[in-house]
Image (tube, coloured by chain):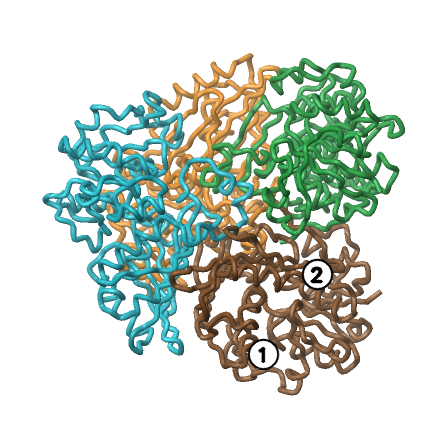
Chain colours: A brown, B green, C orange, D cyan
Amino acid sequence: MIEIGIVGGSGYGAVELIRLLQHHPNVTIKYVFSHSKNDEPISETFPHLSHLILNYTALDEKGVSCDVVFFATPSNVSKHLAPDLVDKGVKVIDLSGDFRLSNRHMYKTFYGEEAAPQQQLDAASYSIAEWSEVDWQHTKLIANPGCFPTSILLALHPLVVQEVIDTESIIIDSKTGVSGAGRSLAQHVHYAEMNENFSAYAIGKHKHKPEIEQYISTLSGKDINVTFTPHLVPMTRGILSTIYVKLNEYTTTEELQAIYKQYYDDKPFVRVRDIGIYPKTKEVYGSNFCDIGIYVDEINQMAIIVSVIDNLVKGASGQAIQNLNLLYGLDETTGLNQLPVYP
Amino acid sequence: MIEIGIVGGSGYGAVELIRLLQHHPNVTIKYVFSHSKNDEPISETFPHLSHLILNYTALDEKGVSCDVVFFATPSNVSKHLAPDLVDKGVKVIDLSGDFRLSNRHMYKTFYGEEAAPQQQLDAASYSIAEWSEVDWQHTKLIANPGCFPTSILLALHPLVVQEVIDTESIIIDSKTGVSGAGRSLAQHVHYAEMNENFSAYAIGKHKHKPEIEQYISTLSGKDINVTFTPHLVPMTRGILSTIYVKLNEYTTTEELQAIYKQYYDDKPFVRVRDIGIYPKTKEVYGSNFCDIGIYVDEINQMAIIVSVIDNLVKGASGQAIQNLNLLYGLDETTGLNQLPVYP
Amino acid sequence: MIEIGIVGGSGYGAVELIRLLQHHPNVTIKYVFSHSKNDEPISETFPHLSHLILNYTALDEKGVSCDVVFFATPSNVSKHLAPDLVDKGVKVIDLSGDFRLSNRHMYKTFYGEEAAPQQQLDAASYSIAEWSEVDWQHTKLIANPGCFPTSILLALHPLVVQEVIDTESIIIDSKTGVSGAGRSLAQHVHYAEMNENFSAYAIGKHKHKPEIEQYISTLSGKDINVTFTPHLVPMTRGILSTIYVKLNEYTTTEELQAIYKQYYDDKPFVRVRDIGIYPKTKEVYGSNFCDIGIYVDEINQMAIIVSVIDNLVKGASGQAIQNLNLLYGLDETTGLNQLPVYP
Amino acid sequence: MIEIGIVGGSGYGAVELIRLLQHHPNVTIKYVFSHSKNDEPISETFPHLSHLILNYTALDEKGVSCDVVFFATPSNVSKHLAPDLVDKGVKVIDLSGDFRLSNRHMYKTFYGEEAAPQQQLDAASYSIAEWSEVDWQHTKLIANPGCFPTSILLALHPLVVQEVIDTESIIIDSKTGVSGAGRSLAQHVHYAEMNENFSAYAIGKHKHKPEIEQYISTLSGKDINVTFTPHLVPMTRGILSTIYVKLNEYTTTEELQAIYKQYYDDKPFVRVRDIGIYPKTKEVYGSNFCDIGIYVDEINQMAIIVSVIDNLVKGASGQAIQNLNLLYGLDETTGLNQLPVYP
């Protein structure tokens, strides 16, 4: 059994890891780490786990006894703690943004803090699991992608790789459920103000913008700048991204949909909808699926791609487990066969 | 493998059975029956299942080839179809109300239709799984309990059996999420009218009232009439029942909680909260748990019991699988170890 | 024009007063007081008011220049500030709980703080507007009722006054929208945890319990203890109270409904539903109505009364304005003719 | 007093007209017409109006006795009924789409029915109230704009008129609350399926697309094709449109915001947010405001405009009353000074 430790135990990423790993045959959770809640039973923070006999513990030398440590922490935590674990031979899968950007300047601009040293950043492997080019034999630290980027990059990948679109024209309008904001309290996610309310936020300033641009730039070999507007939806889970791109050559909806169908034919977690059908966030609720719908405005030669994920599963803990599977040479679906919870 | 057929394939009970059975090691779903959608792919009705290659089929002679057929139908369906299957040797687990009431007059009063023949009703086995007294060797038709009754009877069972309360004094105030109303369209569950709205309904007339009374009457040996008020909550899943009962003898919260703790100690799906903590519906979301909180108003000598379930799991498809496990002599938790989806 | 000051300007009670007073022909808002936000424009805190040129100001000597000061503050504020204003000739309408309980011991038990001096409590006038017995000529400080008590006392008033029920048997199961918890941040009203969640809270400990008991005790001339369970509903506004009481004499639903119809015939804000129809919270959303539905369980001789209000209007700011109208001898509906916002 | 009739009395547009007109000093509602509910009390359909003594009536010769008739009907109704009223001297304000498009072919393509005769279409006046060029002395039939177009055209107007943008580049990503779908039942707006769900719909096919294009084409003098994607948000009210346009010349956020501020300085219902602040749908809930936020992506020279309205007020009944005020030479704010309901 792979022995797991989870850092950030009082957050949503951690409990989602626990929920999903329940179904994983090759894994055992050894520790759930929480600095602030050391020695407290996890059921005090999360009564939905009240049947589990499991206490939080402080991340100290215990981390080293794990095979793999997941960091389900806010940014600015793992960069201080993960390198030491890696040095001691523990594999790290980081769900935070600390090791996603290779450009230290970009990190500082968008995260407002100093980045990890360049050498550590260079050693980290960013992994959109479906298109991972990670050297699994040698990698020690996986940077698990952000939630918005996952929904966006899976949708854009075929278009960029197959050079179907003008990569200078990418406009992304994303909408996320509120759990993406985490468990920390803030006025704008106070129930009475967030309920029955829809808004745009952080336009031009969101941490995921440089992450998207870095990936598309690498993929296309050009220096790409995207337009990205995140919005907040009055619901708990789910991301829907609507992506607008100019087509390079005349293409019909049928042709474009066929490209996606073929491209994702052997990817078990990506489901391409039939023409005229667009995916809804609830259709992936609680599951590791990314569902995609395609439309071409033939007059404008504009492709509109709609993709949905559960931000806490495919957008965080689910993809982290998928990466764990890849790291251990397991089938990537191991432990991730949960069907969406519907309705 | 136990080969399963599911009748009522276009409803919520059926897709919840499919979701949960995904994790069951001893079961294979052979058919999903739908009269109105014969030959259509299930993914047309439920795009969240779009990766499944599975077509609806009509319930004809195929039903007989199954080991077990679940009826996840509205009332007034199974009573016409189940007896024939039973006669041909198929086990039936009925999630509808058709075989729950042994009193045909009560059925007619509350369901507005003629009941099944008395002989068939007498042969059916009503099974609150935790306290089932079914003769599993010989039973052929299980009447799976209603969602409200499940939340209520698990809460009342210790009080009635241990004769702690005045059974004439039972007042039940229940609140359910909207999925309990099923998938059929109706004005009061139209989103724009149900959202941001809370209401009581069917006071004194709800189909689950005689079901609760029948069970408590049998348990107590007295003819019991309860006061039962259902309410509709603007959320999809979850039932919370608040139950008010007069205590026979002076009892403290501590004493009463201790009774529950002991009573449910060996029941894996019932979790009794610590004193001062009350369960919330989201703490069982998507899982088969029933969580219970206890308070005694010592001045009035009134016990207040709060219980929560997911109406589609423990209140329907989850308990149906639990009964299937009992029927086949499997551990009752087989395939039902999903943790609640939180948040 | 009556010149108004509002203390607690950064809270929901204050903005609801501003919204409603917009339609009041006899009132002008002179100051909106906020200690923490002194000199800030109100639109920074509440962008929905961004067209108003209105800055918060500190409550100092300016309070004295108002005819009436509303306290829309948490408990433990007005008791320190209101008496001085009253002494200087300003009328005070207090939306908080500081002057509602005449029993200082009860205040300490349920509010966890020392109560105001007995003399000040005795001088305050508690006013359920429909049944107010306040000496409006001489009163200087109105204690505006709590939200739960308003929904409950309007429902119980006819039953108690007409001696229809056993006042020892009162069980109240109340459900409130989340805005009742105010604008201060807390984990249980964090959107991701409150959404799709229903729970009971503060059983036996809620501040409104002694307020209900004090009123019913006065009305009935007996020392009354009620059973009261509040619940939290995933919606912003609205309270629904379901009240269970034993009838003294055999009474039908028709008879009881007729009593209510007659009793509230001349009360413009109380609407009694026809038999078999129960009010929903959305049917009073944004308005000052209290709607009531009646059912008698004739076997048990138990009356079930369902009442709904908007907690921020009839349960707070609307009733406060209704009391202001009474104080100034205006028609009680002045400025309060808003229809419910539906859907 | 202006005597009003309202056709479509069982829909949301009608009850919103009733709610708003309650505050209008120059108007009296004479009839609420409903074919299907002739003679029924309105309170049977809408219990939130249960204190009103008002029965539905059939639209027959009574329509002629009104000064103004509002059509709050689905498409394909007013085109059959309004012309006759107009001929008999009644002014008509049509909230449906029947008279919005001057191109009969476009109507047929997007509405799926034959359009009204060209002569009638030509005689109708489309009126975005803020920028209306209607000849109020002579007009007899006002085509009240659609909800999406209102939110979009108020946002685009300054950019097009001042020739700041490339009108070929317009991309509109709109999100609406569910009340926009009306009161008729449909599976996708069934509560259990719509709740906790976000989706795109009718991409390239929405009825409001040609309406937007017609207006911008007229304004710019060019034949404009826009990209328009509507989405459905799990909330009752509110539209937010995010609009992406290429700037013609280098412009900063400050410069663009200044243009908007000046442009809308004398328009009481349009509020332009400060830089870095974006409006939220709840900040206009229940009111006639349209709030706008501006951002310029200076690298891409892309302007992002965010606008919000309440779809049932500024997007329907509120703007209809604003147009009524213009028709009668009243101040356009008459009866429309309701503040947003917050929270």
Q: Which residue is depicted at the point 63% across and 43% down?
A: B41
Residue C234 % position (x, y) = 53, 45
Which of the two labelled residues, at mark 1 and mark 2, occupies the earlier sequence position? 2
**Which mark's residue is nearer the viewer, 1 or 2?**
1
Task: Identify the secondary structure beneath mark 1.
Answer: loop
Task: Identify the secondary structure beneath mark 2.
Answer: helix
Q: Amino acid at mark 1?
A: Leu
Query: Which quadrant holds residue C131?
Result: top left
> Of the numbered discs in the image, which one, if any, rests on residue C81?
none
Query: Of residues C29 and D77, which is closer to you in this image?
Result: D77
Query: Which quadrant holds residue A6?
Result: bottom right
Query: Which quadrant holds residue A257?
Result: bottom right
Residue B308 % position (x, y) = 67, 40
Q: Quadrant of the N terminus of chain D?
A: top left
Residue C210 % position (x, y) = 54, 38
Q: Which residue corresponds to mark 1?
A: A101
The vertical placement of A189 against B94, above or below, is below
Q: Amino acid at mark 2?
A: Leu
Residue A290 % position (x, y) = 61, 59
* Residue D96 shows up from this direction: yes
The vertical placement of B187 against C142, above or below, is above
Q: Which residue corresponds to mark 2?
A: A17
Are the residues at dot 1 and dot 2 in contact (C-beta closer than 8 Å)?
A: no
Query: Of residues C105 and A30, which is closer to you in this image?
Result: A30
Density class for disc 1 (Cα within 10 Å; few <14, some 14-19, many ≥20) is: many
Q: Is residue C335 left or right of residue C130?
A: left
Instruction: State the separation of the CA atoms marked 1 and 2.
Output: 24 Å
